[in-house]
């Protein structure tokens, strides 16, 4: 595995893009560590080297993912996320705790959080929806990324019209969160849910708009018709 790990890192270093290196930090308030490789190239590298792992066990690949996460480089976190998602047909219930540990130990920016949660963890909870109760527990965490994860994990299922009661529960648990990245996370989740359940999400907004942070509200209603947006944004006197 160390040989593949070194090969991946050499490949990343060969594909450094000057403009990407100069601008990567601009997308984050927190300090990140990066090689400066375009996301599209990182995806190609992920697919290329995953083929080299076809004889490896899931445990071995997850161990490699740990090493990639531990580097601190955002591109290596993306490759770890991609590798774990490529294994989705092999997910077992215990894998939830692997993904949770990665959030606890390694996630330190919104992009790594969303890449892991939108795909690997989101796919996992569609397979094992009983673990949505664990996502609800995330909302009590002191870790901002864990609270954001509670919402963004359900983005893709939300677009498919799934888990509406749970989505509304998580939104309510995060409703008055003071962290703007958590506010944006659950607003994004509600926006995704509105694609299949516009009426229910609009009713939720109207019920909660007096206390819902403006950031969350704007994210939630972004895809709604203009008339509904106006009603939602109107301040009651």
Image: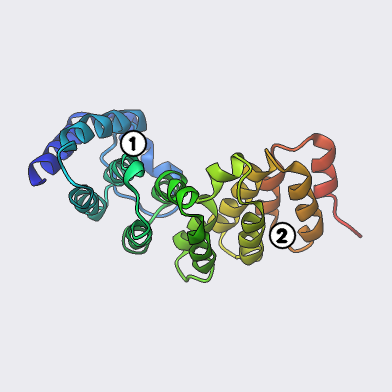
Tell which residue pokes out farthest to the right in this image. Answer: 237
Query: Whole-Å distance between the Cαs marked 1 and 2?
Result: 36 Å
Residue lying furthest left: 3
SS category of the residue bearing label 1: helix
Q: Is residue 120 left or right of residue 178?
A: left
Q: Position of residue 116 (x, y in %)?
A: 39, 48
Q: In this view, does 12 lie above or below 1?
A: above
Q: In which quarter of the image is the C terminus?
A: bottom right
Q: Exactly how many numbered labels are in the figure? A: 2
Could you tell whether 35 is left or right of 53 in the image?
Answer: right
Q: Is mark 2 on a helix, strand or loop?
A: loop
- Residue 113 percent across, percent down from the top left: 42, 51
Q: Which residue is pictured at 70% across the width and 37% down the height?
A: 223
Residue 97 — which label? none
Of 88 and 46, the residue lying toward us: 88
User: Is 39 placed above or below 209 here?
Assistant: above
- Residue at image coords 76%, 49%: 200
Placement of 132 over or under 157, stated as above or below = below
In the picture of the structure, the residue carrying the numbered disc 1 is 22
| Residue toward you, 74 or 158 | 158
**In x, y percent, where is residue 143?**
44, 66
Q: Mark 2 points at which residue?
A: 212
């Amino acid at each position: 595995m160390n040989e593949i790990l070194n090969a991946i890192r050499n490949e990343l270093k060969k594909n450094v893009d000057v403009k990407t290196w100069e601008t990567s930090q601009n997308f984050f308030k927190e300090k990140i560590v990066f090689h400066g490789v375009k996301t599209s190239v990182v995806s190609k590298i992920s697919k290329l080297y995953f083929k080299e792992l076809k004889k490896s066990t899931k445990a071995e690949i997850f161990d490699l993912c740990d090493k990639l996460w531990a580097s601190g480089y955002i591109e290596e976190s993306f490759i770890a996320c991609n590798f774990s998602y490529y294994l989705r047909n092999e997910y077992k219930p215990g894998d939830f705790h692997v993904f949770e540990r990665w959030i606890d130990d390694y996630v330190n920016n919104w992009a790594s959080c969303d890449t892991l949660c939108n795909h690997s963890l989101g796919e996992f909870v569609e397979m094992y929806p009983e673990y949505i109760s664990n996502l609800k527990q995330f909302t009590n965490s002191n870790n901002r990324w864990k609270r954001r994860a509670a919402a963004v994990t359900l983005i893709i299922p939300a677009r498919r019209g799934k888990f509406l009661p749970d989505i509304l529960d998580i939104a309510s648990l995060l409703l008055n969160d003071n962290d703007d990245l958590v506010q944006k996370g659950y607003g994004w989740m509600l926006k995704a849910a509105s694609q299949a359940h516009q009426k229910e999400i609009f009713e939720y907004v109207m019920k909660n708009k007096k206390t819902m942070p403006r950031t969350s509200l704007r994210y939630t209603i972004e895809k709604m018709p203009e008339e509904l947006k106006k009603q939602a944004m109107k301040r009651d006197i």
